[in-house]
Image (spheres, helix red, strand yellow):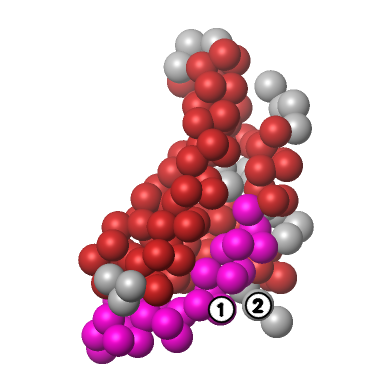
Amino acid sequence: MSEYDECTDALVDHTVLIALQAELGGDPAIIHAFVRNYIALLPWRVSRLHRALDSLDMDDAMDAVLSLKTSSHMVGAVCMEHLASELEISIRLLPNADHLLELRPQVTDIDQCVFGTTRELESPIL
């Protein structure tokens, strides 16, 4: 069983966006733009992880996973955030960049989460 299988019931916590909207004065247009931006950048963030692993670039892999984790947290993409956090820990535990390719299964879990996360974020909640 992959990490993704464990969080398919809760890909997105919409209360995060509702709270952010309230904090920003209640304007749903701001939240919708924020979510659209996250969705637009999500494939790029994930492909950046693939490139970093393929090129054995530890610094870029860490930067990419932190970007994914932080942005996912901000929109309530809890499964994506969880998977990115697990990948971050795995990167930190590697002895050197030569072992980055061993993390491909975790990036595959992230790949599998992209469609569902996008679909849930695109569904109207506000």
Closer to the eye: label 1 or 2: 1
Q: Which residues are magenta?
A: 89-114
Q: Is residue 70 above or below residue 110?
A: above
Whole-percent x and y of residue 89? 38, 73
Q: Which residue is mark 2?
A: 2
User: Is 54 displayed left or right of 19 in the figure?
Assistant: left
Q: Secondary structure at mark 2?
A: loop
Residue 89 shows in this picture: no
Q: Nearer the viewer, residue 92 or 60?
A: 60
Q: Residue 113: within the magenta?
A: yes
Q: Is residue 114 above or below residue 30?
A: below
Whole-percent x and y of residue 82? 52, 61
Tell me which residue sits at (56%, 42%) in the image.
76
Tell me which residue sits at (30%, 86%) in the image.
98
The quadrant in which the C terminus is found is: top right
Do tag 1 and tag 2 residues touch (Cβ < 8 Å)?
yes
Local crowd size for mark 1, using a 10 Å CA cut-off: few (<14), some (14–19), many (≥20): few
Q: Which mark is residue 105?
A: 1
Report the amino acid beneath label 2: Ser
Quarter assignment of residue 35 = top right
